[in-house]
Amino acid sequence: MAQGNKIVIRDFSFYYNSFQALMTINLDIQPRQIFTVFGPARSGKTTLLKSLNRLTDLIFGTSHTGTIFLDGMDIYDPKVDVTQLRRRIGMVFDLPTPLPMSIYDNIAYGPKLGGTNRKNRLNETVEKALRSAVLWEEVKDRLHTSALRLSGGQQQRLCIARVLALEPEVLLLDEPCSGLDPISTTSIEETLIQLKKEYTIILVPHNIQQASRVADRAGFFLNGELVEEGSAYQIFTKPREKQTEDYVTGRFG
Amino acid sequence: MAALSTIAVMILILFQILKEGLPVLNLHFFLDSPKEMGREGGIFSTIIGTAALTLVAIIFGAPLGVGTAIFLREYTRESKISHMIRFGTDCLAGVPSIIFGLFGFVFFVIRLNMGWSILSGGLTLAAMILPTVISTAEESIRAIPPSLREVSYSLGGTRWQTVTRVVLPSALPGIFTGILLSVGRSIGETAAIILTAGSSLVMPTSLFSPIRTMSVHFYILAREGISMKMAYGTGAALILLVLMINIMAQWLINRYIRHRT
């Protein structure tokens, strides 16, 4: 195992009942970078992300072989506290998913679950998270109104802020811009570039253009296999594999 | 056409009972205890009886039912156990109320020696409303998008935290509606109550006192030909009570939803 890798995936295969969604994946992810996982639909991207914080545990009839290390710790070790793991690896989903409560309560939800109840502390956390997600200025006067009244782009930044409030180490983002207009998309991409200074980010991009705009490294997935992995510049300009080149140049996908 | 005739029938029934019953209603009718078997006086003790019985039924039935629904939807996958529980509740839903009455009589009244009492009647009613509470609660829990649960888990929530902080608050209006339907059924029940709670007109003093509910009072007044006038009065009061509960519930639900969104 190379030193300094935040996440190390070793011979990881994943099955939904008898369907194999991931084929013996080996992948190292370095800290403070944006790693994009891209490929056509049903190529295993979301499965990979949900395996990283073990949200796949919630789905009935799944199994895996191989394993994943976070800072050298085997996350599938039976001794691992899954709720702790999920606090270290935050996830933002493809559609904005505000909980049906106020903006403030959405952000405070995670910290409160962890037992943080002091008002001052929560207020600070909420403000800091909203500022990091570049949402504070827009909502600071209506923190106690329902989060469902925000626009789509605001809701998605709220979801990012909600994850940041837990001060995770890794951020998983599964097509966070898929439901958004170009302006909201731009503001989320700017947010991500700010965030990578502190976090390890794994992003399933909305499209290749987005991947090339924000990614440091990239991995191309096809039918559950990691076809090719490398620096974003190399992958998007001089891919080694024919399949990657075909996909990147838009010949299929 | 079908909808129209439904409404017509409803209006006809309401009109008939209210026409005969409303003139009987006044403050004394509500606040005086029945005299001479109900021929004179009011219906106060039966109002208290109805309230006490319904309360006991809800106190026992609602937590059990909602708990079962949570267990079925959040804690088990489709399995032998969940199938068995569902089959059981479906059977329970199809059992005629007089059978519940008989069961309550044999089990609570005689076997557990509770006698004809609020407790016996309330527990019998609790068993009777269980299927309604379970199925409405299950339905409203099912309607909550899985993505909300996923969010809660992904933020480090345990199953219990997810259920109590995300699932239940969102399902509350539906659960509440189910409980309300059950209240309606409890208030309207007669046969099972006569068998388990008796039909005493005496003011109850404890959970072990026998009581008479408004529906039972109505039934006995009409059946024994004691006083049709008082029977209609009781009927009108019953209708107003149910109406009031429904309006109150609507108001509560609206307020709750507005508060959250």
Image: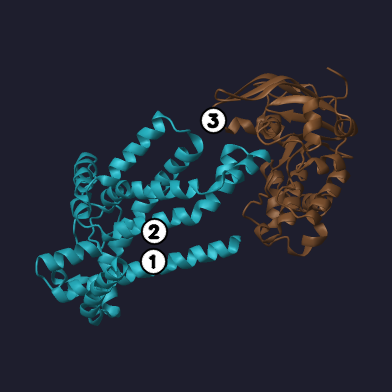
Disc ID at residue B180: 2
Q: Which chain is represented by cyan in the image?
A: B
Task: List x then y, in percent, for residue B29.
Answer: 25, 76
Q: Left or right: B104 with respect to A238? A: left
Report the mark closest to the observer, 1 or 3.
Answer: 3
Chain bearing tag 1 is: B
Q: Residues within 10 Å of mark 1 (few under 14, many from 20)?
A: some
Visual colour scheme? by chain
Identified by mark 3, the residue type is Phe
What is the secondary structure assignment of the residue under circle 2? helix
Residue highlighted by disc 1: B245
Q: Farthest residue toward the front?
A: A251
Q: Farthest residue toward the bottom?
A: B23
Residue highlighted by disc 3: A60
Task: List x then y, in percent, for residue B249.
Answer: 44, 64
Q: Residues within 10 Å of mark 2 (few under 14, many from 20)?
A: some
What is the secondary structure assignment of the residue under circle 1? helix
Relative to B227, residue A181 above or below:
above
Report the mark closest to the observer, 3 or 2.
Answer: 3
Residue at 51% over, 65% down: B254
Circle nearer the N terminus (1, 2): 2
Identified by mark 1, the residue type is Ile
Quarter holding the N terminus of chain A is top right
Q: CA distance from mark 1 to mark 2?
A: 8 Å
Q: Which chain is represented by brown in the image?
A: A
Q: CA distance from mark 3 to mark 2?
A: 34 Å
